Image: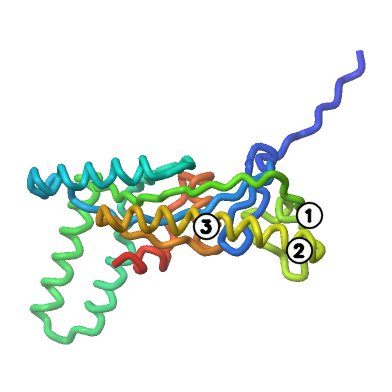
Amino acid sequence: MPQQKTSAQSSQDFVPVKEVRDGVIVLQNGGLRAILMASSLNFALKSEDEQSAFISQFQSFFNSLDFSIQIYIQSRELDIRPYIETLEEEFKRTMDDLMRIQIREYMEFIKSFVEGADIMTKQFFVVVPYSPPALSSVNTGILGALPWSQQKGASTGNSKEKNAFEEHVSQLDQRIAIVQQGLVRTGVRTVQLDTEEVIELLYKIFNPGERDKPTQMIKALN
């Protein structure tokens, strides 16, 4: 009996993302998504009146929306390597012997503490969607060059398709403004991720075993 040939499927076939253009995720079905990184606040440290006010404001924010949003929380093991590298540089620059001993002991303490405590970091994101009635898309070869970065010289479609995309993005921008204004009333600040930051986030989602790479987007909220 002849062996039946099966076509191997790439993991890209199961990814709903077609491309990332101008910081906007374009899905295979034509839908658009923008990602906002949100600041956090310590709810437990607030007084009862402040907690009640926050809950009321948050409830009002959700009730004011006429579209759905998604809140995504990413938990990662704390990566102390950048901090240790900073201490290493300080150790090399310091000429005082006592200070060098203290820095070395502090480095060892930080390493042992983090390893034993299993400290996690959390990042908060808000996904703002927009589904246009019809979005003509052009095969720009993005799926052949994951992770979702546009190739130089790739075709972006004709002017009609480009204008349609820009029109849909303007509708998405209006929703982004509504979400940002609503959240700032609750004390939560947000910043929209650009193309590079969106690609980095998607890479981390689909490669959970990888260590976090340094990023500038967290500094925007500090």
Report the amino acid beneath label 2. Thr
Which class describes the residues within 10 Å of circle 2: few (<14), some (14-19), or many (20+)?
A: some
Residue under pointer 3: 198
- Report the residue at 33% width, 48% height from top: 77
Q: Position of residue 106 (x, y in %)?
A: 15, 65
Query: What is the C-alpha distance between the residues marked 3 and 1?
Result: 20 Å
Q: Position of residue 191 (x, y in %)?
A: 40, 62
Residue 100 appears in which quarter of the rendering? bottom left
Nearest to N terminus: mark 2 or mark 1 = 1
Nearest to N terminus: mark 3 or mark 1 = 1
Which class describes the residues within 10 Å of circle 1: few (<14), some (14-19), or many (20+)?
A: few
Residue under pointer 1: 138
Using residue 47 as the reference point, say whether residue 138 is left or right of it.
right
Q: Secondary structure at mark 3?
A: helix
Q: Along the line of sight, which residue is nearer the eye, 144 or 180? A: 180
Q: Which mark is residue 156?
A: 2
